C-alpha cells in the first residue's frame, strides 16, 4: 500500500511539532514573535520557488534553473534601476519579465522540442548564472535601493513580515491551481502517464508550458524579495535555492516521479526545513548539522516516494 498525501502531511506536521519542542528547550529566544518573523523572512524566496516547483514536479518534471534565474532577474533589476535609470517599478517589472522569459525558454525546450526537463534545466541553470556573472563581471553589486522598495523585504504589516503576505498569497494561488482547477487534475494525470493523458485529450504541451513559465515567473518575484531583504542584487543570489526548494517539495510528500503531491505538504516541508536551520543556529549547534539533517530528511522522503511508486 502507498502512503497517501494526507497521511504524509499529518506525519510531517507531527515531526514539525516535535522539532519546535526540541528547539524551544535547547535554544534561547526560539519561541518569540521576532524569531518567527525571522524564519518567515529567511525562507520567503525559497518558499516561492518551492510553491512553483510543486506543479512542475507533479508532472514528473524538474526545474534546476530557478536559483540561477533568480540571480539573473536580480541583476536585471539592479542594472535597469542603477545604470539605465529606470523607475524602480519599471525595473521590478523587468526582473519579473526576465523570470517569465527564462521560464518560457524552459517551456519551449521541454514542451515543444521534447527535451527531458533534467537536461534542459541543467543547461539553463548554467546559462542564467553565466549571464548574471557576465553582466556584473562577477563583482558588481547593486545596492542603495529606495526605502519604499526595501519595505518589501524588511517591513512588517503589524507584526507580520511583508514577505509572509506575498508567500501566503502565492500559496493560495498555487493551492487553487493544483487542487481546485481542472488544470491541476490534468497535471497529476500527466505525472502518472503523460502518454495516457495525451490520449485522454489533455493538451500536454500547453500544460507543461504553463507550469514552467509559472516557475520562471516565481523566480522573478523571488528575486525582488531577495534584493529587498538583503538590500543588494548580485550574481551569486539564490545559490543553492533550487536544491532547498526541491527538498521542501519532496519532503512535503510530492512524488519525485510525479502524479502525487500537495501544496499544503510543500508548505509543511518548507516550514520544517526553515525551523531546522533556525533552531540549530539558536541552539548554538554546528551549522553543518543543518545540511546533514536536511539530507537525511530528503533521502527518507525519496525512499518513501520510491517505495510508493513500486507498490
Image: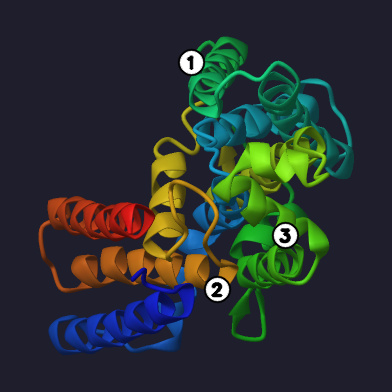
Which of the two labelled residues, at mark 1 and mark 2, occupies the earlier sequence position? 1
Residue 120 vertical position relative to residue 173 in the rendered view, above or below:
above
Badge 1 vs badge 3, beta-carbon distance below 8 Å: no
The x and y percentages for residue 273 are: 34, 64
Of circles 1 and 2, the one toward us is 2
Rendering coords of residue 127 (x, y %): 56, 15
- Between disc 1 and disc 3, whose residue precedes? 1
Question: Is 9 displayed left or right of 208 in the figure?
Answer: left
Residue where numbered disc 2 is placed: 264
Write down the quadrant of residue 270 in the picture.
Answer: bottom left
Q: Quadrant of the N terminus?
A: bottom left
Identity of the residue drawn at 35% across and 60% down: 308
Residue at x 58%, y 20% (from the top left corner): 128
Residue identified by numbered label 3: 184
Q: Nearer the viewer, residue 68 or 135?
A: 68
Q: Distance between the residues labelled 3 and 2?
A: 14 Å
Q: Mark 1 points at which residue?
A: 138
Q: What separation in Å lies between label 1 and label 2 (alpha carbons)?
A: 38 Å
Q: Quadrant of residue 177?
A: bottom right
Amino acid at each position: 500500500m502507498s502512503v497517501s498525501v494526507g497521511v504524509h502531511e499529518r506525519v510531517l506536521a507531527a515531526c514539525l511539532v516535535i522539532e519546535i519542542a526540541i528547539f524551544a528547550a535547547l535554544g534561547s529566544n526560539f519561541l518569540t514573535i521576532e524569531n518567527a518573523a525571522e524564519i518567515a523572512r529567511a525562507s520567503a524566496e525559497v518558499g516561492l520557488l518551492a510553491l512553483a516547483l510543486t506543479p512542475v514536479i507533479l508532472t514528473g518534471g524538474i526545474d534546476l534553473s530557478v536559483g540561477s534565474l533568480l540571480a539573473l532577474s536580480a541583476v536585471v533589476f539592479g542594472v535597469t534601476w542603477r545604470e539605465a535609470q529606470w523607475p524602480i517599478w519599471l525595473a521590478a517589472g523587468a526582473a519579473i519579465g526576465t523570470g517569465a522569459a527564462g521560464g518560457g525558454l524552459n517551456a519551449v525546450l521541454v514542451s515543444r522540442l521534447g527535451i527531458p526537463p533534467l537536461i534542459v534545466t541543467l543547461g539553463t541553470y548554467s546559462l542564467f548564472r553565466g549571464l548574471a556573472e557576465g553582466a556584473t563581471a562577477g563583482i558588481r553589486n547593486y545596492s542603495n535601493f529606495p526605502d519604499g522598495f526595501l519595505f518589501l523585504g524588511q517591513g512588517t504589516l503589524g507584526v507580520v513580515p511583508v514577505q509572509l503576505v506575498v508567500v501566503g498569497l502565492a500559496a493560495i494561488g498555487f493551492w487553487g491551481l493544483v487542487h481546485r482547477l481542472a488544470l491541476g487534475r490534468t497535471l497529476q494525470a500527466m505525472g502518472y502517464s503523460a502518454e495516457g493523458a495525451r490520449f485522454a485529450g489533455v493538451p500536454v504541451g500547453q500544460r507543461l508550458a504553463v507550469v514552467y513559465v509559472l516557475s520562471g515567473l516565481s523566480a522573478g518575484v523571488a528575486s525582488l524579495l531577495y534584493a529587498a531583504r538583503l538590500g543588494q542584487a548580485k550574481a551569486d543570489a539564490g545559490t543553492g535555492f533550487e536544491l532547498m526548494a526541491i527538498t521542501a517539495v519532496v519532503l512535503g510528500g510530492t512524488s519525485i516521479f510525479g502524479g502525487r503531491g500537495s501544496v499544503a505538504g510543500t508548505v509543511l516541508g518548507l516550514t520544517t526545513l526553515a525551523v531546522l536551520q533556525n533552531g540549530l543556529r539558536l541552539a548554538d549547534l554546528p551549522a553543518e548539522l543543518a545540511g546533514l539533517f536536511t539530507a537525511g530528511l530528503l533521502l527518507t522522503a525519496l525512499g518513501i516516494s520510491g517505495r510508493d511508486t513500486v507498490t
